[in-house]
Image: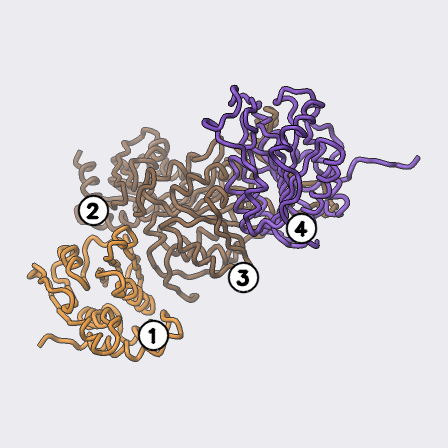
Chain colours: A purple, B orange, C brown
């Protein structure tokens, strides 16, 4: 019988700890497929964040470094500068990248570090139990915005791709979503390109992936995917912001 | 021997480079040397000083609470440091810029119009060298010959053409007498 | 004898790092240690190394974490408030067992404080400024020559034990010039780093650098491993110098440039018929406890002199363990005690 689908080599053959309906697993698989397709597992170093995916060093088969909250782009800078032949990716959530690590991501982009950042935006803090994130939508209820996010108190959601688009060193910026098959295919295309941008030394590349958190959103997995489509994409438009036509 | 020298003036008068050259000469003579520049907030106010020790023995504290010699290039420096000069020590002052007189009768005083002379010689920045010349002749802290060697070592090559003139300035201070 | 140079302490630290084979420096400007950055910004490109001015101290220490993970010799330097910002990274590096050299040219605190000489970061350095049960080797040189030698050593110690080694000096030490001879770095060891994350090359199992251990049994085991390593360091890496202690009336404990002031006080006291000894801890951690035990029976009392409100004092008291009184004299805020005032303190002790 012909094999039509198999686990990517770069993905470890162990059960993941994510909640039912969480899309981290999909994003992991996409990254692993890309690593396989580009045949770079042996020289890739992944950087795990603080957040639900803190231990994704267990899930990838390449060398992995776990970073302090928000510091992955700085850690990645150190690794990449030490061994430029490595392919280095950071995997960061919205609290990690867009709150505590704002300085690190902006300046890694500013320096045009040859890094690939996968930014998983699910509009909430998952691991610490559903607190408000910088990307939490207006009126969204979280454990620290129990009456909904209101501008007077919490300010407005942060659009990371749009923000980074003003930075010269950030050469590839795209927002994708894994809420449906088409979205998953586009996400993979974007992530693959983001790796290739790094491998051709063009500069900093980031793919924001709109992702679900059924547990902390208080929704069923199916409803959560609908919520991405209806609410998140409405505020965070999908598409390429920079580098769409870049030759890599 | 141990010579403890404080050099003090405004920033830009070459106080720190004078200290560095002096320490360098001491090093060429295989002595222990230290040179501690002021680096505190007072630098912003425009005054600068450095503590230089040249000694036959290992140097203890690089911080000078008293000095065998004091070179001053402005009035505030004289006011600040004249009391730390040991009895029998000396004060060398740039009389072009220092018009106060030290209130001490237990030290030797040399008053040299260093800035004016340096200006007349064509390079006002050599005032510090003139004053060092006097320090060397009055104390024998280092050998005059080594001064030239030190300049060649310390100065970047593009400034080596100035060295003969600097040695002239040193010579002027070395031989200066008020009479 | 090799060639001698007249150099500023901060420049010597930078030169020592280069001679120790350090090719990666990440830092953020802060006085009074900026000459380290200036020197390396100029020299690193000449030797194919990397000098990177980070956006913050936090970023700089995490770049160190990254480069150390990649197996290279790496250094950062800062001054007190900057070192405070680095504490998160320091704790992570200690837990992940990465070798790194950190220089602290201490300012007088607390807060933004001032830039004049102080030793007020002793507690932060030796007791763990960051969170958790970790230690780092802390070396306190007292001359420019020693600054060179200890900085080179710091890289070797770090690699050997997979630990952080901190060079801690007062502002004076960074700013002053003295003669230095760059003795051959013969004892510069090369240690293989099979644990480094440099890519599997598809030839080995993956390496993971981490400081998170969710299972308590595993984390306790990791802590035990760290503690065993610290015991080993305590056994092998004590550095101390003592002078005149055999029949001293008073033994002074002082580190860094304060010890040099004491060396001026010793002959002054001698003239007044008082024998003063000096114990100078060079490694502040591991602390030379045995040296104090060895001489605890000798003097009438100990006197600790520091540029702070009494920090090493606690370690001296623990080491002397009640056998003799331990007095303290300290200055703060960038003030430096002069020889006369220290002698007066000594006389107070001998009179009492």
Would you place residue A17 above or below residue A174 in this image?
above
Query: Is residue C191 in view?
Result: no
Q: State the CA–CA distance, disc 1 to disc 4.
A: 56 Å
Tell me the distance, in whole angstroms, between the alpha carbons under discs 1 and 3.
Answer: 29 Å
Q: Residue at x 23, y 57 (%)?
A: B47
**C93 or A157, which lies in front?**
A157
Chain ID at mark 1: B
Disc 3 residue crowd, few under 14, some 14–19, many 20+, Cα 10 Å: few
Q: Do labels 3 and 2 touch, CB within 8 Å?
A: no
- Describe the element under mark 3 as helix, strand or loop: helix
Q: Which residue is mark 2?
A: C269
Rounded to the nearest whole Å, what is the CA distance between mark 2 and mark 1?
Answer: 40 Å
Tell me the quadrant of the picture where the N terminus of chain C can be found: bottom left
Q: Which mark is residue A197?
A: 4
Q: Please tell me in which quadrant of the rendered image residue B116 appears.
A: bottom left
Q: Select label 3 or label 4 by which is in front.
A: 4
Marks 1 and 4 belong to one chain: no
Chain bearing tag 3 is C
- Residue under circle 1? B149
Labels 3 and 2 positioned on one and the same chain:
yes
- Do pointers 3 and 4 mark residues of a single chain? no
Badge nearest the viewer, 1 or 3: 3
Crowding at dot 4, Cα within 10 Å, few <14 / some 14-19 / many 20+, comes out as many
Residue at (37, 61) in percent of width and height: C7
Judging by the rendered image, the residue that carries numbered circle 3 is: C47
């Amino acid at each position: 019988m012909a094999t039509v689908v198999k686990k990517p080599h770069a993905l470890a053959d162990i059960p993941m700890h994510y909640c039912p309906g969480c899309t981290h697993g999909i994003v992991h698989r996409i990254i692993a497929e890309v690593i396989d397709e580009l045949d770079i597992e042996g020289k890739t170093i992944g950087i795990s964040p603080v957040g639900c995916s803190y231990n994704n060093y267990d899930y990838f088969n390449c060398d992995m470094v776990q970073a302090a909250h928000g510091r992955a782009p700085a850690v990645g800078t150190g690794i990449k500068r030490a061994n430029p032949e490595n392919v280095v990716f950071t995997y960061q959530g919205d609290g990690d990248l867009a709150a505590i690590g704002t300085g690190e991501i902006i300046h890694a982009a500013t320096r045009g570090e040859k890094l690939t950042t996968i930014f998983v935006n699910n509009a909430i803090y998952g691991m610490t139990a559903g607190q408000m994130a910088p990307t939490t939508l207006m009126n969204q209820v979280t454990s620290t915005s129990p009456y909904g996010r209101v501008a007077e108190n919490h300010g407005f959601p942060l659009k990371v791709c749009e923000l980074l688009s003003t930075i010269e060193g950030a050469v590839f910026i795209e927002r994708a979503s894994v809420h449906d098959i088409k979205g998953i295919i586009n996400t993979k295309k974007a992530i693959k390109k983001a790796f290739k941008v790094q491998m051709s030394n063009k500069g900093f590349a980031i793919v924001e992936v709109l992702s679900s958190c059924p547990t902390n959103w208080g929704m069923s997995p199916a409803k959560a995917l609908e919520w991405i489509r209806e609410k998140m994409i409405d505020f965070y438009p999908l598409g390429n912001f920079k580098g769409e036509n870049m030759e890599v | 021997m141990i010579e403890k020298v404080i050099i003090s003036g405004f920033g830009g008068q070459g106080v720190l480079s004078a200290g560095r050259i002096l320490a360098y000469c001491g090093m060429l003579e295989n002595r222990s040397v230290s040179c501690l520049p002021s680096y505190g907030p007072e630098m912003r106010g425009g005054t600068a000083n450095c503590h230089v020790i040249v000694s036959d023995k290992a140097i203890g504290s690089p911080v000078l609470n008293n000095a065998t010699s004091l070179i001053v290039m402005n009035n505030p420096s004289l006011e600040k440091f004249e009391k730390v000069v040991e009895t029998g020590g000396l004060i060398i002052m740039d009389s072009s810029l220092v018009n106060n007189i030290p209130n001490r009768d237990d030290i030797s005083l040399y008053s040299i119009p260093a800035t004016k002379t340096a200006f007349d010689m064509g390079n006002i920045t050599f005032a510090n060298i003139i004053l060092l010349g006097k320090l060397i002749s009055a104390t024998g802290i280092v050998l005059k010959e080594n001064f030239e060697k030190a300049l060649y070592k310390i100065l970047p090559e593009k400034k080596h053409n100035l060295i003969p003139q600097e040695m002239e300035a040193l010579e002027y201070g070395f031989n200066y007498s008020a009479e | 004898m090799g060639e001698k140079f007249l150099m500023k302490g901060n420049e010597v630290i930078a030169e020592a790092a280069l001679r120790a084979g350090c090719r990666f420096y990440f830092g953020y400007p802060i006085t009074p240690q900026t000459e380290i950055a200036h020197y390396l910004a100029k020299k690193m490109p000449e030797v194919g190394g990397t000098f990177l001015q980070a956006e913050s101290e936090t970023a700089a220490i995490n770049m160190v974490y990254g480069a150390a993970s990649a197996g290279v010799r790496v250094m950062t330097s800062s001054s007190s408030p900057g070192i405070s910002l680095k504490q998160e990274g320091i704790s992570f590096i200690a837990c992940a067992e990465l070798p790194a050299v950190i220089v602290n040219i201490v300012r007088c605190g607390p807060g933004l404080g001032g830039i004049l000489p102080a030793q007020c970061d002793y507690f932060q350095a030796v007791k763990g400024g960051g969170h958790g049960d970790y230690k780092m080797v802390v070396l306190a040189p007292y001359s420019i020559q020693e600054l060179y030698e200890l900085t080179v050593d710091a890289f070797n110690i770090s690699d050997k034990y997979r630990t952080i080694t901190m060079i801690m000096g007062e502002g004076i030490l960074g700013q002053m010039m003295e003669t230095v001879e760059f003795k051959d770095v013969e004892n510069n060891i090369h240690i293989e780093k099979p644990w480094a994350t440099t890519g599997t090359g598809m030839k080995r199992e993956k390496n993971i650098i981490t400081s998170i251990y969710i299972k308590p049994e595993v984390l306790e085991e990791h802590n035990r491993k760290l503690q065993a390593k610290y015991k080993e360091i305590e056994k092998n890496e004590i550095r101390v110098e003592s002078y005149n202690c055999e029949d001293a009336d008073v033994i002074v404990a002082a580190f860094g440039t304060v010890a040099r002031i004491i060396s001026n006080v010793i002959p002054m006291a001698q003239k007044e018929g008082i024998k003063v000894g000096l114990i100078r801890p060079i490694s502040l951690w591991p602390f030379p406890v045995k040296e104090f035990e060895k001489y605890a029976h000798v003097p009438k009392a100990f006197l600790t002199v520091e540029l702070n409100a009494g920090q090493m004092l606690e370690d001296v008291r623990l080491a002397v363990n009640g056998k003799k009184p331990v007095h303290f004299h300290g200055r703060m805020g960038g003030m430096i005690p002069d020889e006369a005032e220290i002698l007066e303190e000594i006389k107070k002790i001998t009179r009492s």
